[in-house]
Amino acid sequence: MDILMSALRAGFSVDAAYFCLAAIGLNVQFGYAGLINFGQAGFLAVGAYGFAVGSVSLGLPFFAAIGLGLLCSVALGLLLGVPTLRLRADYLAIATIAASEVLRLFFGAAFQGVFHGRDGISGFSAGFQAANPFQQPFLGYRPTDLWVMTVGWGLVVVVSVFVWSIMRAPWGRVLKAIREDEDAVRSLGKSVYTYKMQALAIGGLIGALGGFIVALGQNSVQPDNFSFDLTFIVCTMLILGGAARIMSPVVGAVLFWALLSLVSGILSALTEGQDPVIPTWLMTGDQIGTVRFILVGVALVLLMVYRPQGIFGDRKEMALNA
Amino acid sequence: MRFRPALCLVLLVVAFFGAGSVAVAATSPAVTAGVDGPGVVKVTGKLVNRDDTGSAPVAGGTVTVTDASGAKHSATSLADGSFSVEVPFKVGTISIELDETSLPDGVALREGGRNPITRAVSSTLPLTVTFVLGKGDRQTLSWVDQVPQSLFNGLYFGLIISLGALGLSLIFGTTGLTNFAHGEMVTFGALVTYALNVMGADIWLAGLLAAGLAAAFGFAQDRFFWRPIRRRGTSVLAMMIISIGVQFILRNTYQFFTGGRTETYRQYTTPEGHRLGPITFSIRDLVCMAIALVLVVGVTVALRRTRLGRATRAVANNAALAATAGINVDRVIAAVWSVGALLAGTCGLLLGFSQAVKFDLGALQLLVMFAAITVGGLGSVWGAVIGSLLVGTLIEMSTLVIPSELKVAAALFLLIGVLLVRPRGLLGRAERIG
């Protein structure tokens, strides 16, 4: 029972909230526009670092620092989009995965005076927590987490409504048409490049919002928060929910975190104690982290092979052709 | 038939675990013994004074280790500079402090060197710490004097990376798959070589076996995993996402068995350096370069001259047309996967000499390999080689101006630059790619 409860709690935690925002961003890029962005972690990173540097080093007020983070993520979108969006889809994938990895190294090693290396930047959420209306722990969540969760899931709702409205507007229809057949859209006189660029930037902006939630939730940002694993998990969550559906990133995120927590709960129950159910020569408690990630990998592969449309999606929409 | 890829995936993972368990059981008796015994953590290190004239061991330095419970344990460095302190095992952080007043005159901690050093203790594995001694910065050579050595290092690195890049490019050329799991095949070569070497095999035998096993692994991956997926009509982009999943599975499996440890082979770890003008190199480096060169030239010549090579180029050009001409496309692709994996495995086992063997050895090189084949031209064979040499040289040369942790950033900038100016790469075919 405890395992089930903690799984349920994990499904709505701060982590699930920021992963959900990252997945909504990726949904705009990948689900609607068909852009394969393997560097969503990079967008979260520049958002979070933009905000943190703005607050701590530049001493900007809260909303100005948020604005700086958003600007940085748009800049990253442009930097990656300009050279790659005119080319075949795999170039964007390569450039984004490369950029997110380099950004992680950059924040970890360059300008130590500003980024503080691998220790990261911390101590900027006092003002945000001062506005916290929660005083008591509730359902086992700490008051500080409750406040971040409220803002995070609030953002998820706002952003989901926003995505829903732009996707049923003409702009969204053009985007979906680009995903299906670029040449047809081009022949109608639309600038495919501009639309793709806008989709990449909007997805990146939403990702940056996720970055703010990471920063506020931990009251710090470290380069290793934004490793390739993050992108990978976001991708799996989105495909689990089903790409190109408004609700899919939300359901995907909640379900994914609940399942992940359930698996680690079960595994730790099986490996703990003097005489664990799983013998120690096979697996110890330290290895739970890697085992559950192996299972996530297997899940992604099986999903992509047998049910690329996930829970809600339409198989025809996931017939990626490039 | 419908669930064949799933079955194969499960079998592959199980087989992998089976093989891995055997290897781990054979390689890590010492570690398990340490865990069972009375908990002692051994902290070792060496005090070496480095300056422009060379390096000399420092004797008589006192090192004090404060364990997690607050007790202090001291040791003094011996004539060869080494020290060793045993502290009772307790999970927590320990701090290791060098008494600077105990150092001989003229020897001091280098500026910016950390003292005390804190380490987290979570197991009884021995810890190694380094105190950087010497005066001022190690970069005593002038900028210009370092150029030849960087150039040599770059060519060395580029030549070895070109093995991985060539395999990646071949697989891309024939199947259209951008394989994000290629770095894991590189790691495979290094890990198998390490496991065999530790079990007692000579490094040459271990390397040969590892390369052979890598080829078998590549063949199996294609035959039992990718081919069924291709048969299902899964699109290339979907396969790209699947390859990300495979990358994740393999990398975490490696981590499961090696547990994030950093290892080195048992032979040729610190070869004797030779000097030729401004360049320092070792015989081992030359042998590694020669192996890489022979393989690269061998594969490119085979692609030109042999029947299979010509068939491969035909499939890369147009698979459907090649099939109508009587070429068994599946067999060609299986051969390409085997050769690609063999090259990648060799790349990994050679990298294992210059960089330490670790579960993410290859994953870290993936970006470099991608940059190399994009710069050279996706799918082009000579492009992959020339791209690797260019990227390798650029990465090593960039350490002259930027911190070495950031050197791969140079590869990214070259990648973006090439995409802006000449997206098809240096030697890519002139075709529509956008």
Image: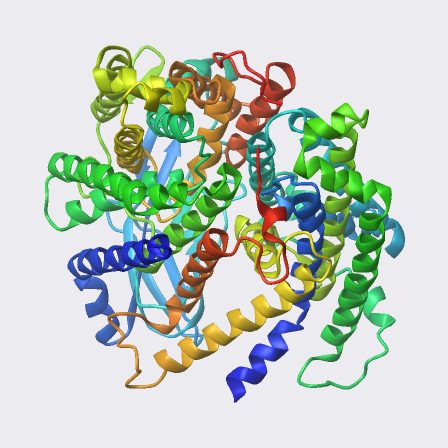
Q: Quadrant of residue B151?
A: top left
The answer to which of A45 and B147 lies nearer the viewer is: A45
Res B90 quadrant in image = bottom left
For residue B154, say whether it is visible.
no
Q: Can residue B275 be seen by looking at this rendering? A: yes
Residue A295, placed above or below residue B319: below
**Compared with residue B237, is residue B176 higher up or lower down, i.e. above or below?**
above
Above/below status of B417 relative to B252: above
Name the residue located 73 percent from the left edge and 46 percent from the top edge.
A203
Who is closer to the viewer here, B262 or B366? B366
Residue B331 place in picture, x, y as percent: 26, 31
Q: Percent x, y for residue B419?
A: 61, 21
**Color encoding of the figure:** rainbow
Residue B418 shown left or right of residue B28 in the figure: right
> Which residue of the protein is positioned furthest toward the bottom in this rendering?
A1
Q: Specify whether B93 is left or right of B80.
A: right
- In percent of width and height, residue A242 lies at 62, 57
Q: Say which of B200 and B424 sits in front.
A: B424
Q: How many marks?
A: 0
- Give the quadrant of the C terminus of chain A: top right
Q: Position of residue A73 (x, y in %)?
A: 75, 42
Residue furthest to the front in view is B324
> Is residue B256 rendered to the left or right of residue B108?
left
